[in-house]
Amino acid sequence: MAVVKYHKETCSRCGGSGEHSYNQLTGSVCFKCHGAKEVTSKIGMKAREFATSILEDTLENFINDGTQLVKMRNGRQRYFHFDTYTKEEEPMGNYLVGGVPRQTFKYTFFRKGKEVPALNVISQDYHDKRPIRKIPTTEQVQEISNYQDKLLARRRRK
């Protein structure tokens, strides 16, 4: 799987040491870079926004044939990966939104044929807007890297 390397710069708070003033709770770890000594630069953030624009979609637009691997956030703010899902025909229950009843359905997510433990009950109106993020292909990683390189070249010219 291809990975995007976003442009980084030395942390301006700790000067690249990863440490800042000491306290008893967290020690001397820098709060800006969390001890990594580097932070994503403004150009890296713009490249990340560009990546989000080409990789994010909704569950409604997902091609459910097992050819595309995506990740989705569950209720605990963690990501899980899947390539297909099923939806049961019968609703599991109802709830009210502004006095209007909404239905919930059971969704089961799979990756390589095995069930993925995840948030499996989704309301129908949320299903249409459910955000997913495609796992980037090599071509998409190259496109993001080229965009970032173009931004870096523009900055060097100034």
Image: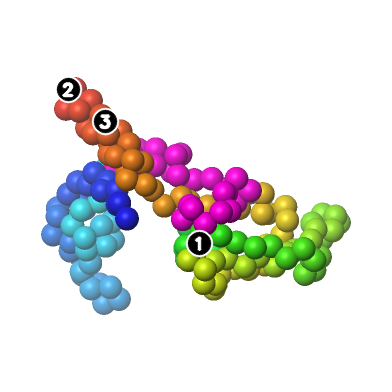
Residue 151 - label: 3
Q: Is residue 48 above or below residue 130?
A: above
Q: Residue furthest bottom?
A: 24
What residue is shown with label 1? 82
Q: Is label 3 or label 1 in front?
A: 1
**Circle 3 — which element?**
helix
Q: Amino acid at mark 2?
A: Arg
Residue at image coords 49%, 53%: 67
Q: Residue flagged by tag 1: what amino acid is it?
A: Phe
Out of 117 and 110, give the one closest to the viewer: 110
Assign a secondary structure to mark 2: helix
In the image, 41 versus 103, the foreground residue is 103
Residue 155 versus residue 28: which sits nearer the camera? 155
Q: Which residues are magenta?
A: 44-70
Question: Is residue 94 something that shows in the picture?
Answer: yes
SS at badge 1 = strand
Residue 116 visible? The answer is no
Q: Residues within 10 Å of mark 1 (few under 14, many from 20)?
A: many
Q: In x, y percent, where is residue 151? A: 26, 30
Q: CA distance from mark 3 to mark 2?
A: 10 Å
Precedes in sequence: disc 3 or disc 1:
1
Mark nearer the viewer, 1 or 2? 1
Please, what is the three-letter code of the amino acid marked with disc 3? Answer: Leu
Question: Residue 131 appears at what percent x and percent y?
Answer: 56, 51
Q: Earlier in the sequence, mark 1 or mark 2?
A: 1
User: In which quadrant of the rendered view does residue 17 lie?
Assistant: bottom left
Q: Which residue is mark 2?
A: 157
How far separated are the C-alphas under marks 3 and 1?
Answer: 33 Å
